Image (cartoon, helix red, strand yellow):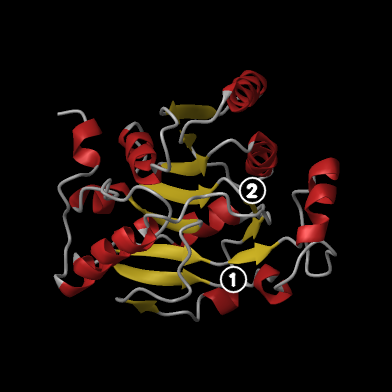
Amino acid sequence: MKSALLISTYNWPEALDLILKSVLNQTRLPDEILIADDGSTEKTRELIRRFKKENNIVLRHIWQEDIGFRKSKILNKAIAQTTADYIIQIDGDCIIHKNFISDHIVFAKKGFYLYGSRVNILPHKVSEVFENKIINFNFFSKEIKNRTRNLRISALSCLYKTHFQISNKFRGCNVSFWKNDLIAINGYNEDFEGWGREDSDLVIRLGNNGIGAKRLRYAGIVYHIFHKSNFSKTKWDFNDRIQKETITKKVTKISNGIDKYLKK
């Protein structure tokens, strides 16, 4: 199974630098890294160029013009470029535990997607994390809260059962799925512009198409770097209506999706 780590980012190279350092710290590397860049400036591009020059790992930087929040579009463009079988997806504000990739691969199962939780880095500790380039945390680390989420106990993780409905524990910053399952529903819905609902709508449609879910608890850990949200939420009501229609009409495959980027 070939895996790809998909990282969405926008104009926060300091965070992306720590994320990439945490990738190199993995017990099992992904076969490639996909950076889905929704219009970052040259500073992010230079960081990526330096990382590619210094490290022997396949990295694809997929960029689009900055004309507003278009996360669905850039994620589709990035996924369309990989030949990986399995996509492991995080947001550009999440450092990953050293066993993160391994956990997602070990628990991957045909017919299911995985979703994990996140440990939050305390707001007043963020500057210290950046200054000291901290990427490893344990239960007693003073930089984090939600400490029980930082326990990695595979035996306990195995106790969590699969299910066929979206969980209120789902977070789009920590999810993995089979590429073919995503293509079957035509990927992310690019009608979503502006912040909100694009991730949950995707997994609801996966569920509508017969794909089950499994929560990664005590495994697949990410560390969310606190930041004030600067995304406009003016499209929230519109996006919420799309998702409600997905639920009520049991929508699976949408029209404005990934197919336009796939090689025929």
Amino acid beneath label 2: Thr
Q: What element carries label 1?
A: helix
> Where's residue 230, x and y in %?
57, 49
Work out whether 242 lies above or below 134: below
* Residue 194 in the image, given as x and y percentages of width and height: 40, 49
Q: Position of residue 63 (x, y in %)?
A: 44, 28
Secondary structure state at the residue bearing disc 2: loop
Q: Quadrant of the C terminus?
A: top left
At which x and y percent is residue 212? 30, 70
Give the residue drawn at x 58%, y 79%: 156
Q: Is residue 1 visible?
A: no
Q: Marks 2 and 1, Cα distance to the nearest angstrom?
A: 15 Å
Tag 1: Cα neighbours inside 10 Å, few (<14), some, or many (≥20)? some
Q: Is residue 237 left or right of residue 49?
A: left
Is 99 or 170 nearer to us in this picture? 170
Instruction: Look at mark 1 in the image and give the residue it sits on.
Output: 154
Q: Residues within 10 Å of mark 2 (few under 14, many from 20)?
A: some
Q: Can residue 152 be seen in this view?
A: yes
The kind of residue tagged 1 is: Ser
Name above or below for residue 221 compared with residue 93: below
What residue would you read off at disc 2? 27
